[in-house]
Image (cartoon, rainbow, N blue to C red):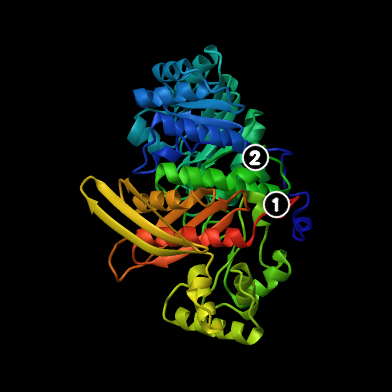
């Protein structure tokens, strides 16, 4: 990076940073989120594929289900170290250790706010409790990670004293939590530097995003030499969330040149799994994993990206398991429209492509989105072609529903053939999806990798959007989109859009 030389010698960057993932503990403390033991196991397996160093699997004292989840994760034989949270209480520590974890994360607040209003103890009593808890946890034969809760609102000299007490009692590593997201990067850097000097132990930080600074504060800690970073997938967590794992590791890799054990290509898959199981969906503009992170509409930007992606992309989307997306809309230019038409299998001269562009802009001025299916319909109308030129099209979709579920009957035209199927399922969307896949199965092998539907209402005044990722007969992954008023029809049309793209761009012989 051109700016790195401006700061040479100012940082104490470690060669490698360990990622302490707390998605299953602090992430699950997101209001409204509750994971079953089976769901926590599924996420833990994916976190291990991602390459996190430590998985904080839960807070065992909380419930029987929590203890089962942590214990089940410990039995998986994962490469990651498994950690459990415990207060500085013997019973908490015993319950945590008995689940079979490698690490126990003990915590006691050190700020006067917490000591006075929550713990109702003096500073000296807190120091005694920290020492006793760390010593006891060490006696149980586990790695001990101590956190001074609310560290960034703790008087500095007392904080350093508490951290030294924990280190002297045998803590293997020390964590500095910014519990309410109250610190700024320079403060984190100073605290980490002092903690390293006072304790001589590996230093971690645990940053919350109440002021939008969790990632910046975490990176600032690394600049001061922190070797362990707490983070959650998608930045989920209490209140405004925690430091985002994906943002931190990509920044460390790309901006700082600091190594982690993370397999970057597993980032998007992990993000989608966590969003699905927690029900906390990813904002479209979320860095790295948001739908728009590698999407381009503006004509100037699209022209640049099509010529050389680095003009308007900081990293290649494939690095994190993503794909670039060119979007049609009121800001589009002719280069983007040309590209999208070719992706839809249409070869139009420049004059007709400009007509398509003007129609797209007019729709955009009316506040309308233009997904691939709409773009193709516009282009075929301008070219004077019939919609029958589609390789695959929806002829009919009938849905009936009652209190028990929904029945969907579908009719497709595939080439010259008409194929029909029906399916009963729990909702109109799932019944339609099942009927569609049943109808397709006689003609092609469609593998639905992922689909997302954004629908807030069935009201005709509101629209819903669907995006699917699929393959056809082992083709390259294809993305299909659709917009409309009825979620069932939108999902079906998105899948048909993706199939048509896949059929137009099959894997070439000898490629993968």
- Image position, residue 229 (x, y; %): 59, 39
Crowd around label 1: few <14 · some 14–19 · many ≥20 (10 Å): some
Q: Is residue 28 above or below residue 73?
A: below
Residue 237 seen in render: no
**Residue found farthest to the left:** 403
Q: What residue is shown at x 42% (from left), y 38% (from top)?
A: 28
Separation of residues labelled 1 and 2 (CA atoms): 13 Å
- Image position, residue 159 (x, y; %): 52, 34
Q: Which residue is mark 2?
A: 262
What SS does tag 2 mark? loop
Q: What residue is shown at x 65% (from left), y 45% (from top)?
A: 264
Q: Nearer the viewer, residue 287 or 374?
A: 374
Q: What residue is shown at x 67% (from left), y 33% (from top)?
A: 197
What SS does tag 1 mark? helix
Q: Which residue is mark 1?
A: 254
Crowd around label 2: few <14 · some 14–19 · many ≥20 (10 Å): many
Q: Nearer the viewer, residue 511 or 260?
A: 511
Q: Is residue 427 above or below residue 351?
A: above
- Image position, residue 350 (x, y; %): 65, 84
């Amino acid at each position: 990076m051109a700016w790195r030389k401006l700061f040479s010698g100012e940082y104490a960057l470690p060669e490698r940073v360990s990622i302490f993932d707390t998605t299953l503990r602090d992430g699950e403390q997101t209001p409204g989120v509750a994971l079953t033991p089976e769901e926590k196991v599924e996420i833990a397996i994916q976190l291990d594929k991602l390459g996190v160093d430590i998985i904080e699997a839960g807070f065992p004292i909380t419930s029987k289900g929590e203890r089962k989840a942590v214990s089940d994760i410990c039995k998986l034989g994962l490469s990651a170290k498994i950690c459990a949270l415990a207060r500085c209480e013997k019973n908490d520590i015993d319950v945590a250790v008995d689940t079979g974890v490698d690490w126990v994360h003990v915590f006691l607040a050190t700020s006067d706010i917490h000591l006075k209003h929550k713990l109702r103890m003096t500073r000296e009593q807190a120091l005694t409790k920290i020492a006793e808890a760390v010593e006891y946890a060490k006696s149980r034969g586990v790695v001990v990670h101590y956190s001074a809760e609310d560290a960034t609102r703790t008087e500095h000299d007392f904080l350093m004293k508490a951290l030294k007490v924990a280190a002297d009692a045998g803590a293997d590593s020390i964590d500095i939590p910014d519990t309410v997201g109250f610190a700024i990067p320079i403060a984190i850097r100073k605290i980490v530097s002092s903690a390293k000097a006072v304790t001589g132990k590996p230093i971690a930080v645990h940053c919350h995003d109440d002021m939008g600074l969790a990632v910046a504060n975490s990176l600032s800690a690394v600049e001061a030499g922190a070797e362990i970073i707490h983070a959650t997938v998608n930045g989920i967590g209490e209140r405004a969330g925690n430091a985002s794992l994906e943002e931190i590791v990509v920044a460390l890799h790309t901006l700082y040149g600091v190594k982690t054990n993370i397999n970057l290509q597993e980032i998007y898959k992990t993000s989608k799994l966590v969003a699905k199981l927690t029900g906390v969906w990813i904002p479209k503009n979320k860095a790295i994993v948001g739908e728009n992170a590698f999407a381009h509409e503006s004509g100037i930007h699209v022209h640049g990206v099509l010529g050389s992606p680095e003009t308007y992309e900081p990293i290649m989307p494939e690095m994190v398991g993503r794909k670039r997306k060119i979007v049609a809309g009121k800001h589009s230019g002719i280069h983007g429209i040309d590209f999208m038409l070719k992706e839809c299998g249409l070869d139009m001269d420049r004059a007709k492509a400009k007509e398509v562009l003007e129609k797209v802009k007019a729709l955009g001025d009316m506040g309308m989105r233009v997904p691939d299916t709409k773009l193709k319909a516009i282009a075929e109308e301008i070219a004077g072609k019939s919609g029958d030129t589609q390789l695959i099209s929806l002829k009919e979709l009938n849905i009936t529903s009652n209190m028990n579920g929904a029945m969907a009957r579908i009719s497709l035209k595939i080439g010259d053939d008409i194929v029909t199927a029906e399916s009963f399922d729990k909702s109109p969307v799932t019944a339609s999806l099942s009927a569609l896949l049943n109808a397709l199965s006689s003609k092609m092998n469609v593998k639905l990798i992922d689909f997302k539907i954004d629908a807030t209402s069935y009201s005709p005044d509101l629209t819903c959007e669907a995006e699917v990722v699929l393959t056809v007969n082992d083709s390259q992954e294809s993305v299909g989109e659709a917009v409309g008023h009825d979620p069932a029809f939108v999902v079906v049309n998105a899948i048909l859009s993706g199939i048509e793209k896949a059929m137009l761009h099959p894997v070439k012989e000898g490629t993968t």
